[in-house]
Amino acid sequence: MKKIVTFLIALAATVFCSQAAPVKVDAQKMLERFLSYARVESASVYVSDMQVFPMTDGQRELARLVYDEVKSFDGKDVKVTLSDDYYVYVDIPSNVKRQVPSILLMAHLDVTPEAPGVGIKPMVHRNYDGGPIVLPGGKTLSPDTPQGAHLKDLVGKTIVTSDGTTLLGADDKTGTAVLVSLVEELISNPKIKHGRVMVAFSQNEDVGKAALRYDPSVFDCRPDVVIDVDGNMAGRFSVGNFTAVGQSYLFHGKSVHPGHGKENGMADALAAAAYFVSLVPPELNPSRREGNEGYVHCFTLFHPKRVDDPKKDNEDDVIVGVRLRYFDREEGEYQKRLMEENVAKTRQVWPRVEITKTDDEMQYENIAYALPEFVPDLVRKAAAKAGMTLEPQLERGGTTSAMMTARFPDLMPGGSCVYSGQQAEHSVYEWCCIEEMLQIVDLCENIVIELTKM
C-alpha cells in the first residue's frame, strides 16, 4: 500500500511540475524585455510621396523579434501573424462562455526620425535617488526641467535613459513591452477571464502612417473597444485629439540666369513658396497655440528629386508641406479655406509659377467622434484597481488609434490612448520607468477583466 501511495504522490508531483506556472512579469523581466527592444534601431523615415510605405531594416528586425517572442509563449488557439508590411497581429480567443465585448490593444514598433536613433545605448539607473541624472553624452536629465519633471514622483524606482546622444525609443517600445507582457500573462494564466483580446503592433506611426498598411481582415471584426498604449502623460488618458490633415503644395518654376530673368521668363518657385508660407497668420503658428486651439504649420520646404536622376534635386521646383490641426470641423473648414485663399494670392503675385496641390491626406481623426460612452469610466475603474489615478484629457497630437479611426471609420471605434511609461519622447532626453510599465500591464489586464462583467 505504501508503494502505491508513494507512486501516486510522485505521479501527481510529476503532473504538477509539468504544467507551466502562470507568468507574472516582474521588474527584471520587464527591464530585459524593454532593453532588447530599445537596442534595435527601428526609426521610420519621412518621404514626400504620401502613398509610399518605407521600411527600414531595424523596423523589420524588431517586428521579427516581437513575433518570435509571442510565438514562444505557445498559446493554445492563439493566432500570431507577421504581415508583409511587418505589422504583428495577436489574436487571443475568449475563454468565457457568454458573449462579452472584444478589445483591440495597440502599440507601434517604429521610433521617430526626429532625433538621432543610431547607436542606442540604454542606461539603467536603479533605485533612483531623486537628483539630476548626468548622461555620458553631455546631457543632464533633471526633475527641475520639463523633460524630467515626473522624476520627482519616482524616487527609488528603476529609470532607463539613453546615453544622451540618441533617443531611447520609449515611444513606443514601452507600449510594445507592456502589451507583449500582457499577452504572456493572458496566455500563461487561463484563470484570467477575458473576452476576445486582439493586439496589433503597427509600423510608421511616427511618420503618420500607422494605419496605411493595417489589414483589418486579419481580425475580421469591428472591435468593441480600442485602447492605444502610447501616452506620455502620467495620470492622463485621451478622450479626444486633433483631427490631422496633411497637405503638400508643388511650386513649379523655371530657372534662368537671374541677370536676364524677366526677358527669359524666370519663374522663381522658391520665392513664390516663401511668399505662400508667409501668408499664414503668425497667430495660427503652433508656437502660439494651446489647449483646444488648432494650428496651421508649414513645416517643410524642399526641392523634389529629378525624374531623370533621382540622386539630384530638381532646383526648378519646390514642395511645401503643411499640417492642419483642429479639434472641431468648423475650425478645420476655416483652415482649408485659408490655404485656398493663400494659393490664389500667391498666383496673383507670382503668375509664372505653377502651383498644384495634392489631395488632402486625413492622417488621423478625432477619436471623440466615435469613442464608446462607457470607455472613460472603464479606464478610470481599471486604473484605480492598478493603483493609478487616470483622468481624461484632450490630446494635442495623434496616436495609432486616431489614425485607424481616420482610415477605417466603419471598422474602428474611437480608441483612448493610455499612458505607456514614455517620457520626453522624440528627444535625446527620452526615458521611462520600469515599475510604471508594470502598473500599466495591470491596467490593461484590469480593462480586459472588467469587460467580462459588462
Image (cartoon, helix red, strand yellow):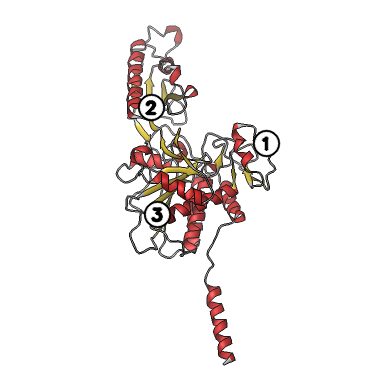
Q: CA distance from mark 1 to mark 3?
A: 46 Å
Of residue 364 and residue 343, the one placed in the foreground of this image is 364
Quadrant into which the N terminus falls: bottom right
Residue drawn where x is 56% and y is 86% of the image? 7
Which residue is disc 1 drawn over? 137
Residue drawn where x is 70% and y is 43% of the image? 129
Where is residue 72? Give x, y as percent: 50, 61
Residue 28 makes an appearance in the image: yes
- Left or right: 279 as drawn, with respect to 236: left
Q: Check contact, mark 1 vs mark 3: CB within 8 A.
A: no
Residue drawn where x is 37% and y is 28% of the image? 247
The three-letter amino acid code for the residue at tag 1 is Gly
Which residue is disc 2 drawn over? 248
Dot 2: within a 10 Å radius of its alpha carbon, few (fewer than 14), some, or many (20 or more) residues?
Answer: many
The three-letter amino acid code for the residue at tag 2 is Ser
Where is residue 270? Give x, y as percent: 44, 17
Which residue is disc 3 drawn over? 451
